């Protein structure tokens, strides 16, 4: 992938069929990027600000299976590396694997007939330790066991709680953005941006552990100020599990204070603007723009939005530094600035390409689908450094 594909954060839309800027009016409360993205006016609550991003084109992504969908249905199996024997399909001779679990390796099998989409930051709970996925990738349908690059987010345990990994205790609405329907369903937790960044950019287990401990301690301070129950205090004080702390009742209520208003406002906005193909957000905490997530379609954004907004809210709850108010122009500039000093590409031919761009004050990551009838960026992430 050349650097030109990263102009304006989601090259997904810089292909044939894109509507030129001159063909679409610019409305009040919008900023148009060079790629055709429109950054809409901010939705704010407390220290969290999100700028919705809409695009002139939304790609067909209905074939992709999410991790939550696969784990809930049982079509996707995640297990410790040492458990791989016996899970191989017989389309080819069985490969002998070394035995024994490893901190930074898990094995995943996609038994569904759909390609599986994995996002960096998704946390799988179980096994000997909870893990966070280290990079975006696509796994073929009916796959043989695939080695996953992961990082532990539970430094205090190395005893199996289950043979396989599953969804955490988190629950999210099944209705999608603005649908107003559906009920709570179990899902994986999405790590907050500061933890995601250590896994995605630094790729260092010790730094991931250090960030987990830092964020747990910060959340402990915030919750303590709200007079938590003795049970919650005991869990937060004693648990080394990032997921268990974040799913604690008092922690969830603290995060909900920020997340719920943002989620409801965004749902209302997207319901009105679905025909304009909302695909992502630019995120600011305490006046500083820190992150963006942009997808190839509104459908994918809908699936990930409930846990994404909670991850952003978790960051806002524990971030103390105060700044001014992030502006629409700043959000647009963050979206557009993608020229980097270094570009790293990893690829599985015919399946996906993963590109990392290291620029001045930022890192950007793009997952490009190479499956038949695709060729577009499925997910693009940018983080401020």
Image: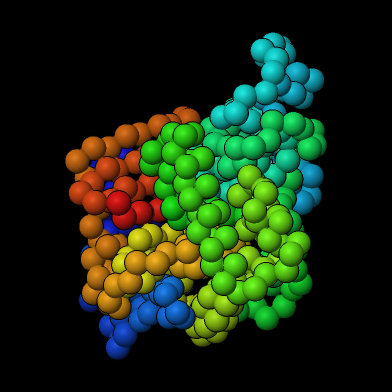
Q: Quadrant of the N terminus?
A: top left
Residue 309 drawn at (x, y percent): 53, 67
Residue 52 drawn at (x, y percent): 42, 73
Residue in front for this viewpoint, 180 or 26: 180
Question: What residue appears at the point 65 percent right and 56 percent down from the top-left corner?
Answer: 236
Residue 207 drawn at (x, y percent): 44, 39
Question: What residue appears at the point 34 percent right and 41 percent down from the top-left corner?
Answer: 356
Do we see residue 229 in this rendering? Answer: yes
Q: How many marks?
A: 0
Do we see residue 139 in this rendering? Answer: no
Question: What residue appears at the point 23 percent right and 74 percent down from the top-left corner?
Answer: 329
Q: Is residue 173 above or below residue 190?
A: below
**Residue 124 falls in image quadrant:** top right
Residue in front for this viewpoint, 64 or 118: 118
**Residue 36 falls in image quadrant:** bottom left
Question: What residue appears at the point 36 percent right and 71 percent down from the top-left corner?
Answer: 286
User: On the picture, is 277 further left or further right than 86?
Assistant: left
Q: Is residue 35 above or below residue 27?
A: above
Which coloring applies here? rainbow
Residue 191 drawn at (x, y percent): 54, 53
Q: Is residue 260 above or below residue 61?
A: below
Residue in front for this viewpoint, 137 or 5: 137
Q: Is residue 181 above or below residue 351?
A: below
**Residue 257 falls in image quadrant:** bottom right
């Amino acid at each position: 992938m050349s650097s030109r594909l990263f102009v304006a954060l989601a090259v997904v839309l810089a292909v044939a069929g894109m509507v030129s800027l001159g063909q679409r009016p610019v409305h009040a409360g919008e900023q148009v990027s060079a790629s055709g993205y429109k950054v809409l006016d901010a939705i704010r609550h407390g220290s969290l600000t999100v700028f919705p991003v809409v695009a002139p084109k939304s790609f067909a992504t209905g074939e992709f299976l999410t991790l939550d969908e696969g784990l809930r249905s049982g079509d996707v199996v995640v297990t410790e590396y040492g458990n791989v024997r016996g899970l191989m399909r017989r389309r080819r001779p069985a490969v002998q694997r070394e035995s024994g679990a490893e901190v930074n390796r898990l094995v995943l099998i996609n038994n569904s007939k759909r390609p599986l989409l994995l996002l960096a930051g998704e946390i799988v709970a179980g096994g000997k330790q909870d893990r966070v996925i280290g990079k975006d990738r696509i796994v073929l349908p009916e796959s043989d066991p695939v080695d996953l690059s992961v990082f532990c987010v539970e430094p205090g345990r190395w005893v199996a709680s289950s043979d396989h990994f599953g969804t955490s205790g988190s629950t999210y609405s099944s209705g999608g953005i603005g649908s107003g329907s559906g009920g709570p369903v179990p899902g994986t937790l999405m790590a907050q941006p500061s933890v995601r960044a250590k896994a995605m950019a630094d790729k260092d287990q010790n730094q991931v552990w250090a960030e987990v401990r830092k964020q747990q301690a910060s959340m402990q301070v915030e919750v303590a100020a709200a007079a938590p129950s003795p049970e919650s205090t005991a869990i937060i004080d004693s648990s080394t599990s990032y997921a268990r702390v974040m799913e604690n009742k008092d922690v969830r209520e603290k995060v909900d204070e920020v997340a719920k208003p943002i989620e409801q406002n965004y749902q209302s906005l997207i319901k009105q603007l679905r025909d304009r193909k909302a695909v992502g957000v630019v995120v600011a905490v305490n006046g500083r723009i820190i992150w963006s997530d942009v997808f190839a379609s509104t459908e994918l954004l809908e699936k990930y939005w409930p846990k994404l907004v909670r991850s952003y809210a978790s960051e806002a709850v524990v971030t103390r530094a105060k700044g001014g108010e992030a502006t629409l122009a700043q959000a647009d500039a963050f979206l557009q600035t993608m020229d980097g000093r270094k570009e790293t590409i990893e690829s599985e031919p015919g399946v996906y390409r993963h590109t990392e761009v290291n620029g001045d004050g930022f890192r950007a990551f793009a997952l490009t689908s190479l499956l038949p009838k695709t060729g577009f960026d499925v997910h693009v992430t940018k983080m401020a450094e």
